[in-house]
Structure formats: C-alpha cells, structure tokens
C-alpha cells in the first residue's frame, strides 16, 4: 500500500534538482555580509535592524520581508563571533549534505517550513503580547531568531547518518546522534529554566509562556518531515528492544526474521530471480517486500550498514525494519 509519505518521497526524488541549490551557502554568505556591515556601523546597525524579526514593524509598516530575512542575522546575534563562525560553518556543512542527499527541492522546503513555523510562533506571541502589554516588548525582541531553525538541520543529519563522526572545534570526535541528544537536552533545559525564571519573578503572563514555543520549532519541523524515521536518533537500546506486543506485531507484518525465515526468503528470492520475466537482471531487491528497480522503477534503494551481510531495502523499509544480525 502506497502511503502519502512514500508518494511525497517519490515526488521529491523525481524533482530533486528543482529549487535553490546550495541554499545554505547563500545564507552563510549573507550572514557574513550583514555581520561585517553591522561591525562597521555598530552604533546604528542599519542592515541588521532592517532584516531582523520585529513584530511591530511587520504589522504596522508591513515590512513583510522580515519574515524570511532574519536567518541572515544569525551570526550578528551570536555573543561570540568565533563561536558564531564555527556554528555557521557547521550548519553550512549540514545544509550541503542534506542538499546532496535529498535534493534542492526537499531541503528548501524543510528549511522554509522551519522559518514559517517560527514566524507563526512569533506572530502568535506578538498578538498576545500586544493584547496584554499594548506593545511587542523588548523581552520578545530576541526570541524570534534562526537558532532553532538551524538546529533542525542537525536533527535531520542525525536521523539520516546517526553514526557519522564530526569533530567539535575540529578536534573532538562525536557522533551525530550524540550531538542531537545534546541539543535536545539543552533545548529542554532552556524551556525548564525559562519557566522557572517566569515563576520566580512572577511574570505569569500568557505571552511570556508562549515564548516556549520557539525552542519547539526545530523538533516539530523535524517530526513533520521524518515521521517514524525520527526514531533513528534514539539510543539503540530503546529502538531495538522489542516488547512482546511489538514483536508479535512485527511478526504479523513480516518484518522479523529468524535464521530459517532468512534462508527461506533468500532461497525464494533466488528461485524467483531465475524465473523468466521476473527481473533476473535486477541489481537491487528489498529484503522486506522483495520489490526491485525493475518491478518498481521509481523506488529508491539503499543498503543498511547495521544488518549482517549486504542487505538492500527500498525507501519504504530502509528506516522501518528490524536489523538482521545473523549471517
């Protein structure tokens, strides 16, 4: 059965060259330009004030470009220029990998969706803040930024290649999934810390609590695009520890293999491949469903690095199968 997500995956795959290629390169260059111009005119940073998110300017002066230009202010808003440049280079690398892996169209939509979700959260905060205080307020001025939009790139890379090693500050090797756990942990810590501050200083306003929506943007955007595949960033002892109920469900769906069933399926696949008209020249065959690039030309196939042997899976099962550990 073809699901909506698989249809979308095929559409993105067939139109992967559409969209803005190397989007993160342009965003990184724009960040550097805005930072240099702001540094040259620190007293009245014209370009920074023109591009950053400002609820009052958006709705009173209809400066709608601010809804999409605030990612160019990411480097300028960092407290440490060196740390900002390193993180900007890292997010540029993440965007380049996603652009090559997904194609320009899907990556553009992923980044744009993060911006739109942040805009919606900022507009909601602004509307409520104006109703409560009569103005947007300086307390919200720095809340709407591209920090968590860029963080969603890290989560996407961690789901696609969780065991990929990167070097923090070009020295310390860390797996991508560990970085994802760290970022999610820091996000949750920030939410709890902000909540405790509001309670401590008795700033119990609805708009101040709505600021907590901004850190959740990255996670929501990540879940929208990955769905069940988002479980790839979970620790292995959680992902691959089947309960009795999940094991029965997996057996019923035919996604669990013991030694006998593996040998039977391989023998059946070998016999079917020799049968006339059944794709005897197929290069890729899904271990779960048996489809090949000949029977389903639009399907994308990949090999699982965690399964024993050289196991191939289609795009519907590469992230949704139980790993085979028996040779």
Image (spheres, helix red, strand yellow):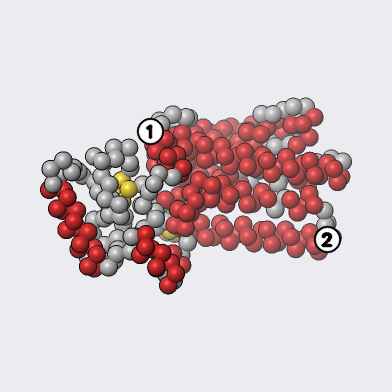
- Mark 1 touches mark 2? (CB < 8 Å): no
Crowding near the residue tagged with mark 1, few <14, some 14–19, many ≥20 C-alpha atoms within 10 Å: few
Residue 53 vs residue 325, the one in the foreground:
325
- Between the C-alphas of marks 1 and 2, the distance is 54 Å
Q: Quadrant of residue 133?
A: top right
The numbered mark at residue 282 is: none
Q: Residue at x 54, y 60 (%)?
A: 182
Q: Is residue 95 above or below residue 272?
A: above
Which residue is disc 2 drawn over?
A: 201
Where residue 258 sits: x, y (%)?
Answer: 27, 68
Q: Is residue 317 above or below residue 66?
A: below
Classify residue 196 as left or right of residue 310.
right
The numbered mark at residue 14 is: 1
Where residue 90 sits: x, y (%)?
Answer: 49, 46
Where residue 293 sits: x, y (%)?
Answer: 26, 41
> What SS does tag 1 mark?
helix
């Amino acid at each position: 059965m073809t699901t909506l997500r698989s249809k979308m995956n095929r559409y993105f795959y067939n139109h992967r060259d559409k969209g803005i290629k190397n989007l993160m390169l342009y965003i990184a260059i724009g960040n550097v330009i805005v930072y240099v111009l702001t540094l040259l005119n620190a007293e009245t940073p014209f370009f920074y004030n023109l591009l950053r998110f400002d609820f009052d300017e958006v709705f009173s002066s209809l400066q709608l470009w601010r809804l999409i230009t605030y990612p160019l202010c990411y480097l300028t808003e960092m407290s440490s220029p060196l740390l900002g440049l390193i993180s900007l280079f890292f997010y540029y690398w993440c965007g380049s990998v996603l652009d090559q892996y997904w194609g320009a169209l899907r990556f553009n939509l992923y980044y744009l969706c993060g911006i739109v979700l942040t805009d919606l959260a900022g507009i909601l905060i602004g509307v409520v803040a104006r109703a409560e205080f009569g103005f947007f307020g300086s307390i919200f001025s720095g809340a709407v930024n591209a920090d968590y939009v860029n963080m969603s790139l890290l989560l996407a890379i961690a789901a696609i290649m969780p065991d990929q090693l990167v070097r923090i500050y070009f020295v310390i090797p860390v797996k991508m999934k560990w970085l994802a756990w760290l970022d999610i942990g820091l996000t949750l810590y920030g939410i709890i810390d902000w909540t405790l501050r509001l309670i401590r200083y008795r700033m119990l306003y609805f708009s101040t609590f709505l600021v907590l929506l901004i850190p959740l943007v990255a996670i929501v955007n990540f879940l929208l695009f990955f769905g069940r595949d988002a479980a790839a960033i979970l620790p292995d002892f959680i992902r691959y520890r089947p309960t009795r109920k999940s094991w029965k469900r997996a057996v019923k769906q035919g996604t669990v293999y013991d030694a006998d069933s593996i040998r039977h399926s391989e023998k059946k696949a070998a016999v079917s491949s020799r049968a006339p008209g059944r794709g005897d020249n197929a290069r890729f065959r899904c271990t779960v469903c048996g489809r090949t690039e000949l029977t389903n030309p639009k399907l994308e196939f990949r090999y699982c690095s965690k399964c024993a042997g050289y196991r191939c899976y289609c795009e519907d099962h590469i992230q949704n199968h139980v790993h085979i550990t028996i040779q």
